Amino acid sequence: MIFLTRKAEFSSAHFYWVDDWSEDENLKVFGKCANRNGHGHNYTVEVTVAGEVDPVSGFVVDLKQLKDILEHEVIRVYDHRHLNLEVPEFRESIPTTENIAIAIWNRLADKIPNARLHRVRVYEMPDLFADFYGEQE
């Protein structure tokens, strides 16, 4: 089994807010991230797939195809967007780093041919990232 990782980058804005809380509660828990106008990050996403090396091509997965899937499913949807306002999966959930990793997993899980999605890692900043390995049973 080989693990292969592809990186991509996107820039997005977001804010943290729970509608059922008061403004004071939101500010207490989320601080400046509760600004409803949002703030931005330059995110890096790493997608790791697992599989066997094809004896003919030498690939676990076609790298061009993986790049195209990332472009179509993640970059086109998230790049230069306000996540809370423009990306469907964040209309009902807060776009934290953790939730972004889960959402990207859900976008990619069944779309990578000849390999199994192993991990999605999302960096919000160089010293802050979340890893998601799918639902653990």
Image: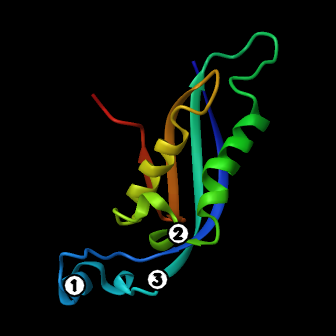
Q: Marks 3/1: CA distance?
A: 16 Å
Q: Marks 3/2: CA distance?
A: 12 Å
Please identify the residue farthest to the right as the structure is shown.
56
The quarter in which the C terminus is drawn is top left
Marks 2 and 1: CB-CB under 8 Å? no
- Residue 23 placement: quadrant: bottom left
- Residue 128 is labelled as none
What crowding class fits label 1: few (fewer than 14 Cα within 10 Å), some (14-19), or many (20 or more)? few
| Label 1: which secondary element | helix
Residue on which the image places disc 1: 28
- With 39 as the anchor, is 80 left or right in this view? right
> In this rendering, which labeled residue sits more in front, label 3 or label 1?
3
Q: Earlier in the sequence, mark 3 or mark 2?
A: 3
The residue shown at (57%, 37%) is: 48
Which residue type does callout 1 highlight? Lys
- Residue 80 placement: quadrant: bottom right
What crowding class fits label 2: few (fewer than 14 Cα within 10 Å), some (14-19), or many (20 or more)? some
The residue shown at (52%, 60%) is: 123
Which residue type does callout 2 highlight? Glu
Marks 3 and 2: CB-CB under 8 Å? no
What crowding class fits label 3: few (fewer than 14 Cα within 10 Å), some (14-19), or many (20 or more)? some
Please identify the residue farthest to the top as the structure is shown.
55
Horizontal and vertical percent for residue 17?
Answer: 31, 76
Residue on which the image places disc 2: 86
Horizontal and vertical percent for residue 76?
Answer: 67, 58
Q: Establish if 113 lies above or below 90.
A: above
Which residue type does callout 3 highlight? Gly
Residue on which the image places disc 3: 38
